[in-house]
Amino acid sequence: MDILIKFHLSKLMGERKLKTADLARDLGVNRGSIARMYHETVEKVDVELLNDLCRYFGCGIADLMEYVPSGNESPKTESETVRIK
């Protein structure tokens, strides 16, 4: 199964010149959890971590990650897309 969720953590961290170890320390989480999201190799996401990341960066969930349809799926129209802010 293809993972169709793209994370923007590397972009958010790059804008602030943060290292994975620094962010993990600031949030009090395992560095591996941050690294997997940063490198987009994460398979399961902890909702509490998402909440902490949104609070830390002052952003919405849509700024942190997005659904990217595969080539054989048609993208949803804006009215069909549910955004969580």
Image (tube, rainbow, N blue to C red):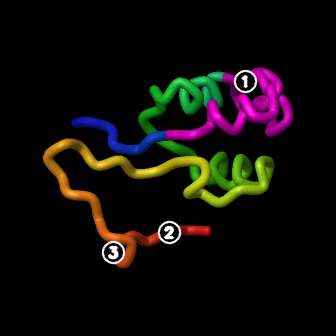
Residue 21 inside the magenta-drawn segment: yes
Instruction: Reply yes or no: does residue 24 show up in magenta.
Output: yes
SS at mark 1?
helix
Q: Tag 3: residue type? A: Glu
Residue at 62% of width from left, 68% of height from top? 85
What secondary structure predominates along the stretch shown in magenta? helix
Left or right, 36 with respect to 30, comes to left
- Residue extending furthest bottom? 79
Is label 2 in contact with label 1 (beta carbons under 8 Å)? no
Frontmost residue, 29 versus 53: 53
The residue labelled by disc 3 is: 80
Q: Which residue is mark 2?
A: 83
Q: CA distance from mark 3 to mark 1?
A: 35 Å
Give the residue at mark 1: 20
Q: Nearer the viewer, mark 3 or mark 1?
A: 3
Q: Amino acid at mark 1?
A: Thr
Bounds of the magenta segment: 7-31
Classify residue 20 by image quadrant. Answer: top right
Say which residue appears at 82% left-offset and 25% top-offset: 22
